Amino acid sequence: MIEPWERLASERRQDYRIFATRIDRYRSPATGETHAFVVVEAPDWVNVIALTPADEVVLVRQFRFGTREVTLEIPGGAVDPGEDFVSAGVRELREETGYAGDEVRLIGTVTPNPAFLENRCGTLLIPGARKVAEPAPEGTEILEVELCPRREIPRRLAAGQIRHALVVAAFQWLDLQEHGLR
């Protein structure tokens, strides 16, 4: 049986505004040896699948600095201190797209990379979303809103037009929801 490792020490290293790093020292339950691991402290994240009354998915195009590409994604962002997934997702949807809905459901969470990240990513489903305001993105965001018929999402995923791993996971949660497994 796999046992948790004993954490012996934890030392904060660098703060980079959107994440921080620390070094954790653990003792192996198998050998007793100690090892150092880098852990990235990042805020929880939320993704929003907003569906219009016409069964369209509200998507955003934006430039991503890590891959240096324009990507097609669902709205989302960091969960601010004091927020939960629902309040953060409602805020992000409205800021990025100007859309809102009356019903909001958390349909799943994932751990983006538990090897070195400690955060979670929640996926919200907001059916009946409608445009209620103009988008008000943050200063470093330049976004273009696109509506896509929901039936086209699997084709766009298969074609690699949507490649953000957390967005792909979000659509898996939607599929599980539709099959009564969530």
Image (tube, helix red, strand yellow):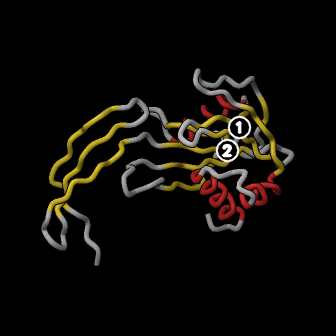
- In x, y percent, where is residue 9? 16, 49
Q: Quadrant of the N terminus?
A: bottom left
The residues tagged by marks 1 and 2 sit, at their Cα atoms, a distance apart of 6 Å
10 lies left or right of 119:
left
Residue 30 appears in which quarter of the rendering? bottom left
- Picture coordinates of residue 61, whole percent (x, y): 71, 37
Do the residues bearing badges 1 and 2 touch, measured as CB atoms within 8 Å?
A: yes
User: What amino acid type should be assigned to the residue bearing mark 1?
Assistant: Arg
Q: Residue furthest right?
A: 54
Quadrant of the image for the C terminus? bottom right
Name the foreground residue: 77 vs 94.
Answer: 77
Element type at mark 2: strand
Which of 51/117 is in front? 117
Which labelled disc corresponds to residue 61? 1
Could you say where residue 29 lies in the image, as x and y percent from the top left? 18, 70
Q: Is residue 106 visible?
A: no
Residue 163 spot, x, y in % from top left: 64, 52
Q: Mark 1: give few (<14), some (14-19) or many (20+) Cα within 10 Å.
A: some
Q: Is residue 68 left or right of residue 130?
A: left
Q: Tag on residue 158?
A: none
- Lower position in the chain sequence, tag 1 or tag 2: 1
Which residue is rendered at x = 74% and y = 23% of the image? 134
Question: Which residue is at a point 76% across and 27% down the rendered structure image?
Answer: 132
Q: Which residue is mark 2?
A: 73
